[in-house]
Image (spheres, helix red, strand yellow):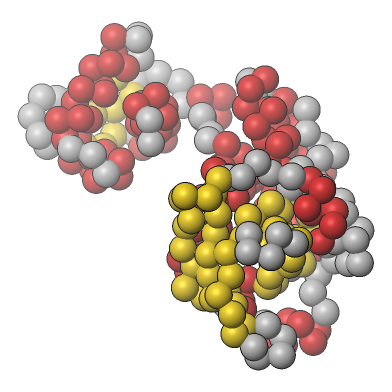
């Protein structure tokens, strides 16, 4: 995390906490208490009304407005909120769905131009299809926990992803791919990729993947054509861009 992001995170925690301690903030941010003291001083220098007692265990509080306009979300957090709302609305008609649309529109419209461009580029690569069939749901396993984190990193940063794969016939293989897209057919999701060794577009189901690893030596530029090629015989390609500013 960059220092600028850490300062924003610290500010959000102070606004939401009421009163907290240097020790608790250091633990939440996974930094030293000395770093928290230094960051608090930087925020005070920028005019933020932060009050507190001296000493390692001293209480700290933010005396200003704690309204929702003060929240600073990372790109990943915005995508998470947006995608979660879209999946919920796709699954069924839920109470407050209209309010969710309105809130999302306000959230997305509030993004700086550069962040909005990044969001568009990321969400263009996400496809939401119909929920999985009963047969797929009955057969579906669970993705290994580390896969979620490593896929997010590889997908966002444009680095290769390696893993062991067991196809529908039960045949195992070791794969190295460029994760260009994501297909969500709740509750199952698929990596839409270019196979590095074969040079061909392929789709991989998350619960058939194991032992994932980053391939930092392999970098790639996201390519919408790969997604279209993978899905040419599958569900219609509908990137979720309709409500972006």
Residue 96 rendering spot, x and y as whole percentages: 77, 48
Relative to 111, is 243 above or below? below
The one nearer the camera, 78 or 50, is 78
Q: Residue furthest bottom?
A: 170
> In the image shown, does 115 or 14 lie closer to the viewer?
115
In what quadrant of the picture does the N terminus appear? top left
Q: Residue at x 63, y 59 (%)?
A: 196
Residue at the image point whose x is 85% and y is 66% from the top: 130
Residue at 29% from the left image edge and 34% from the top image edge: 19
Which residue is situated farthest in the left direction here? 55
- Above or below residue 10? Residue 31 is below
**The C terminus lies in quadrant:** top right
Q: Quadrant of residue 209?
A: bottom right
Within the image, what quadrant is residue 62 found in? top left
Relative depth, front residue between 172 and 86: 172
**Seen in the image, is 35 located left or right of residue 48?**
left
Q: Vertical placement of 45 versus 227: above or below? A: above
Residue 21 visible, this orientation: yes
User: Residue 173 in the image: x percent, y percent?
Assistant: 59, 80
Asked whether residue 107 appears in the rendered view, the answer is no
Whether 33 is drawn above or below 83: the answer is above
Image position of 145 (left or right of 21): right
Number of residue marks: 0
Q: Residue at x 75, y 62 (%)?
A: 200
Q: Position of residue 87 (x, y in %)?
A: 75, 57
Residue 167 in the image: state x and y as whole percent: 68, 82
* Viewer-nearest residue: 3 or 180: 180
């Amino acid at each position: 995390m960059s220092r600028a992001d850490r300062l924003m995170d610290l500010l959000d925690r102070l606004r939401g906490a009421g009163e907290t301690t240097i020790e608790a903030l250091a633990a939440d941010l996974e930094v030293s208490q000395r770093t928290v003291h230094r960051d608090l001083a930087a925020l005070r220098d920028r005019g933020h009304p932060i009050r507190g007692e001296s000493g390692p265990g001293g209480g700290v509080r933010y005396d200003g407005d704690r309204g929702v306009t003060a929240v600073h979300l990372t790109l990943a957090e915005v995508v998470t909120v947006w995608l979660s709302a879209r999946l919920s609305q796709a699954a069924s008609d839920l109470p407050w769905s209209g309010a969710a649309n309105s809130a999302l529109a306000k959230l997305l419209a509030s993004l700086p131009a550069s962040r909005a461009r990044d969001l568009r580029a990321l969400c263009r690569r996400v496809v939401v299809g119909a929920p999985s069939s009963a047969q797929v749901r009955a057969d579906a396993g669970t993705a290994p926990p580390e896969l979620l984190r490593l896929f997010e990193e590889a997908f966002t940063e444009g680095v290769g992803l390696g893993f062991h794969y067991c196809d529908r016939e039960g045949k195992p293989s070791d794969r190295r791919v460029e994760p260009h897209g994501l297909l969500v057919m709740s509750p199952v999701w698929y990596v839409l990729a270019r196979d590095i060794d074969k040079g061909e577009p392929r789709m991989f189901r998350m619960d058939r993947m194991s032992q994932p690893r980053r391939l930092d030596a392999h970098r790639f530029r996201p390519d919408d054509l790969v997604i279209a090629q993978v899905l040419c015989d599958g569900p219609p390609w509908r990137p979720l861009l309709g409500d972006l500013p």
